[in-house]
Amino acid sequence: MRLDELRQDVVLALRSNPSCSLVVVATLALGIAANSLNFSFMNPYLIRELPFGHPHQLAGGKQPYGGRGVKRPRPAPHGG
């Protein structure tokens, strides 16, 4: 789609139903603002570097099957 076609579509949308266009623009602006606000509040807690000397050397553990007490199945024996 070219830019002139996009401009024509926007002008047509504004002429045909301006209140709907206003609601769409306001919703997008509110969503972008909420996302920016959320990022700026969560950035210091979730995205910043870990307070360790060598964070790349840390290892995480995970319990199999969410730790629900389910035993891990044994792999099928290979014939060979």
Image (cartoon, rainbow, N blue to C red):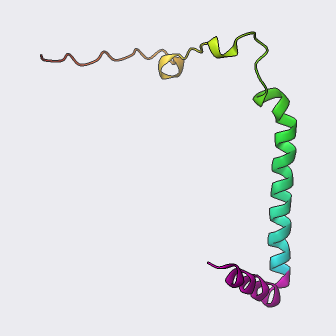
Identity of the residue drawn at 83% across and 42% down: 38
Position of residue 35 in the picture relative to residue 5 (left or right): right
Which residue sits furthest left? 80
- Residue 11 falls in image quadrant: bottom right
Q: Position of residue 62 (x, y in %)?
A: 54, 17
* Range of residues picked out in magenta: 1-18
Q: Nearer the viewer, residue 22 or 80?
A: 80
Position of residue 65 in the picture relative to residue 20 (left or right): left
| Magenta stretch secondary structure, dominant | helix
Identity of the residue drawn at 85% across and 50% down: 34
Q: Is residue 65 magenta?
A: no
Q: Is residue 6 magenta?
A: yes
Position of residue 61 in the picture relative to residue 27 (left or right): left
Q: Position of residue 51 (x, y in %)?
A: 79, 14
Q: Nearer the viewer, residue 29 or 57?
A: 57
- In the rendered image, the quadrant that contains the N terminus is bottom right
